[in-house]
Amino acid sequence: MNLHTHVMVGILVGALFFGRPEIMLMIGVGATIPDLDREYGFFSKESFRRRQIHRALFHNFLFIAMLYFINPFFGIGAFLHSFMDSLTTTRDRGVEWLYPFSRLVTKAVYDSDGNKLELDPKHRIYFLQNDLPGLTRRTTKDIKPGEKPLPNRRTYGPALSGKFLDRSLFFGSAALILLLLLVSALGFQEFIDLSFNELSLPLTLPLLIGSVGVILNFLVGELDRERLIDNAKSYRTYKATFYLTFGIMIFAIILGAIMNPQTVVSLLSNVPYIAVGGALLIIISYAVMTYSSRRFSKDGRKEPLIV
């Protein structure tokens, strides 16, 4: 899905369920965050492609949960983004919802043709099958996987990015937002609060500064990804600008913490409970996996645990 579609859908959801301009903006900004796992600035293009980071690093339940803990509206936007991306085909690599845990499983029971592979007693947990090479060969060039067969770790759908569904969501969401604005402005029904009397500067200012940082990050990143930066001097300027955008985002977070100390106190007070909950989840999941994997036997007569 294209970035402007993610933003528009996020703003629409904010309008439908909350009706506050600042919340609409926060969900829209949150809907851009997952795509920061593109190759922009952090990895060489070959390393980025080899590691298959895009649609994985920031497109997963763990990252969304962490983002929701920081700001629930950012988390909602990130979830909407990842959900829509999971509707795309292998061309855009779908979504690896269970990253990084999915990377711990390196074997599949069946190959891409449905033939059973030889099971390794050292591996007790398997995915069902390998990715289909006939489809992954059609993946966009900058995120095409290597030739080595890999387990099917990703969720795919029927929609090609930038095609019918993408455009329908963008124009449909834009039309609905305009309709809600018109109805609210004419006074028929207040779907969106247009009074702006309660806009909070401590909330709005850091959000706007952070939004500028995110937008600039994508702009300079796309210049590099589209191969429009073709000499050493331009590339140095690009790298400096790229890291400046992250400086702007970090500054916005620090400014938000300074201007909203009560939010920080509330956030920190919940850390112990979240840590205990996370630890219990890991312990219980590990215990269940360990117990279930006992079905595996070295003679191969029993099926391994398939996730």
Image (tube, rainbow, N blue to C red):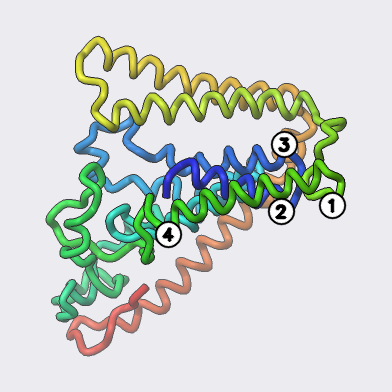
Q: Earlier in the sequence, mark 2 or mark 3?
A: 2
- What's the residue type where badge 4 is placed? Ser
Return the residue at label 1.
Answer: 189
Choose top left, top right, bottom left or bottom right for residue 105: bottom left
Decide: is 25 above or below 254. below
Q: Nearer the viewer, residue 12 or 277?
A: 12
Image marks 2 and 3: residues in contact by CB distance under 8 Å? no
Sequence-first disc among 4 and 1: 4
User: Looking at the image, can residue 75 be seen?
Assistant: no
Q: Earlier in the sequence, mark 2 or mark 4?
A: 2
- Mark pair 4, 3: CA separation: 27 Å
Q: Label 2: which residue?
A: 16
One can see residue 24 in this view: yes
Residue at mark 1 to residue at mark 3: CA–CA distance: 19 Å
Frontmost of labels 2 and 3 is: 2
Q: Which is more foreground, mark 1 or mark 3?
A: 1
Residue 181 location in percent, x, y?
Answer: 73, 44
Q: Mark 4 to mark 1: distance in Å?
A: 34 Å
Tags 4 and 3 touching, CB below 8 Å: no
- For the point 35% across and 31% down, which residue is it? 222
**At x 85% / y 51%, what residue is drawn?**
188
Q: Quadrant of residue 253?
A: top right
